[in-house]
Amino acid sequence: MADQQLYPVPADWAAEAKVDRAGYEAMYAAAARDPDAFWLEQAARLDWVKAPTVAGDWSFDEADFGISWFKDGVLNVSANCLDRHLAERGDTVAIIWEPDEPGEEAKRFTYAELHAEVCRFANVLKAQGVAKGDRVTIYLPMIPEAAFALLACARIGAIHSVVFGGFSPEALAGRIEDCDSKLVVTADCGRRGGKRIPLKANVDAAAAHAPSLERVIVVKATGDDVPMHDRDVWYHEAAADVAADCAPEPMEAEDPLFILYTSGSTGKPKGVLHTTGGYLLWASFTHDLVFDYRPGNVFWCAADIGWVTGHTYVIYGPLANGATTLMYEGLPNWPDASRIWQVVDRHQVHTLFTAPTALRALMKEGDAPVKATNRASLKLLGTVGEPINPEAWRWYHDVVGEGRSPIVDTWWQTETGGALIAPLPGATDLKPGSATRPLPGVQPQLVDENGSVLDGETSGNLCITASWPGQMRTVWGDHERFFQTYFTTYRGKYFTGDGCRRDEDGYYWITGRVDDVLNVSGHRMGTAEVESALVLHPKVAEAAVVGMPHDVKGQGIYAYVTLNSGVEGSDDLAGELRQWVRKEIGPIASPDAIQFAPGLPKTRSGKIMRRILRKIAEGDVGGLGDTSTLADPAVVDDLVAHRVG
Ligand code: ATP
Ligand code: MG
């Protein structure tokens, strides 16, 4: 069974917590009792041109479906992230930028400097004809200009759509066309892990399939030679002609802030739309609570700006709160597995927020690269993106954090804007692998396939029954798809698509996507549980489990296993792993087939794409579908070639 070991709130955290246990309980109760009063009070975290008098106005029912928050409020997101900090924190560092190359100098931007950069960028956009409500596609590496560009859009009321720099020209073209954007901001090239990414060339290739595209602003990032066409403008040239001041556009709370396409693990990406007031409040509220943010703490969210995590916890949450946020251009394990920890030391990082996939990759290289660094500044750890295997959790806690730092495992989605289920470091005892309890204002519910509500200790499908300010408002251009996708499986509820277990303490354990649930001889099991058991074995680095057709059991278990560096797969080891899972979970969970795989197919945000693994396990190698959004499509060929059974 899953790990039930309890890690109590450390004494120093309990003593100094911003929100302690009683504080959390009181807040949770207050938000449940009178959400409007609670959120109107919380809205005072932001600086409004006109303060809202109404909080939530929403319905998840078909007849009057719609979601809005603070709808009579007026504000500007960039003014909240910049201007309002100038008087008190103008000289505080807003962004620390760490380059890909380890020897290269880091850059720092104070709030005053960032303000000027954003204003300049905003004026360049205006000069290129961008107006309020226009969509701007941002296809940039993790360079400071990415932050400038997002905030510049927010400043003038343009809607940004960030496309991850690792996406192909086809994926980029599809996302430009879907939201009918006329302008793309890109760079000559990107750098990541010592490799060049030909961003400008990709935009040129995308342009052939994106007739809406009229203008491309090109940031000189690497200095590589790139051909410039009529539609192209160098950013540094355009910026030389504009003022470093630009008045923020007053926006209604429900005006769109950004579109972000979901990562596509489960099918055609959806243009998730977030709006101005509710989203920013959720970003600020959750960054403050979950990370117990204090002035002076260096906050490092290691996600790319191409994902929602980068939007909410690299840019909007930290900057709304006047924090110092670290932006890193490169990869955690390049040039070697110590890099991430060297960056922590170099910039005295207080809070590190990363993904289980990164942790598993680092853990695979053993403890030595971690122990070669100091990490004394590190006081809080966070994770997001997938269920974290208890084994990886303990490694993060014991080896990386040397036992002193709580881990906040934050469950959320592109659709939710920010964390929904997560511990507060000074309030919540931790259990490895559990995202613990809902944040104030979040009403989770578990239901069975028929929609019947399941109470107490149980497993089911995770729904949220009440709106929260950070909730997405629509799928861009397809409101019907929004309703159909999230609100029709269980009428009147937001269905997350995730399976979940609630334990005797009311803790939530995400078991993976409902589509991934296994049904072996009538027993329902989350893939995460079997994977965690496998990863617990000392020789296993990573595992992905899917169902395969089985004459007797209905579904059998097919496990793809990546071994630690230097370990070879063998029949003996496969037998040992079967016994291991039997012992850890029970005979029912013992894998029917084990394939040793050097790599697993992952989305560019590092999530395992089980859809493809399922097809291979079923032997349907002709039906793999679109593999172009994979980080490394070549791993699929290897998996097909070495399929077992
Ligand atoms: P798509 O919706 O396009 O298929 P995606 O669901 O991978 O892609 P995201 O919104 O980035 O896109 O990811 C949200 C999902 O990630 C959640 O629904 C959940 O399955 C998983 N997830 C995120 N954080 C956690 C966590 N802390 N624990 C368990 N699962 C998590
Ligand atoms: Mg999803």
Image (cartoon, rainbow, N blue to C red):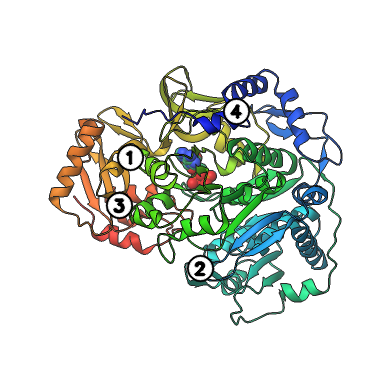
Percent coordinates x, y for residue 93 in the rendering: 69, 56
Within 10 angstroms of label 1, few (less than 14), some, or many (20 or more) residues? many
Element class at badge 3: helix
Query: Helix, strand, or loop for circle 2?
Result: loop
**Foreground residue, 427 or 589?**
427
Q: Indicate the position of residue 445 as horizontal and vertical percent values.
A: 52, 24
In the picture, the quarter occupied by the N terminus is top left
CA gap, disc 1 to disc 4?
Answer: 27 Å
Q: Nearer the viewer, mark 1 or mark 2?
A: 2
Label 1 SS:
helix
Q: CA distance from mark 3 to mark 2?
A: 39 Å
**Residue positioned most to the left:** 572
Q: Count up the numbered dots.
A: 4
**Residue type at mark 4?**
Val
Q: Which residue bears the numbered disc 2? A: 102
Measured in 3D between alpha carbons, the distance from the residue under mark 3 to the one under mark 4, in whole angstroms, is 38 Å
Q: Earlier in the sequence, mark 3 or mark 2?
A: 2
- Circle 4 sits on which residue? 442
Task: Please report whichever mark, 3 or 1, sits nearer to the chain's N-terminal start.
Answer: 1
Q: Quadrant of residue 26?
A: top right
Horizontal and vertical percent for residue 268? 51, 50
Decide: few, some or many residues near mark 3? Use Cα within 10 Å; few <14, some 14-19, many ≥20.
many
Q: Is residue 353 left or right of residue 128?
A: left
Query: Which amino acid, by three-letter code, is at mark 3?
Result: Ile
* Residue for badge 1: 532
From the image, tell me which residue sits under label 3.
616
Nearer-N-terminus badge (3/4): 4
At a point 62% along the width and 47% down the height, the residue shown is 297
Mark 1, ligand 1, within 8 Å: the answer is: no
Q: Is 608 drawn above or below residue 482 in the view shown?
A: below
Q: Which is more foreground, mark 3 or mark 2?
A: 2
Q: CA distance from mark 1 to mark 2?
A: 33 Å
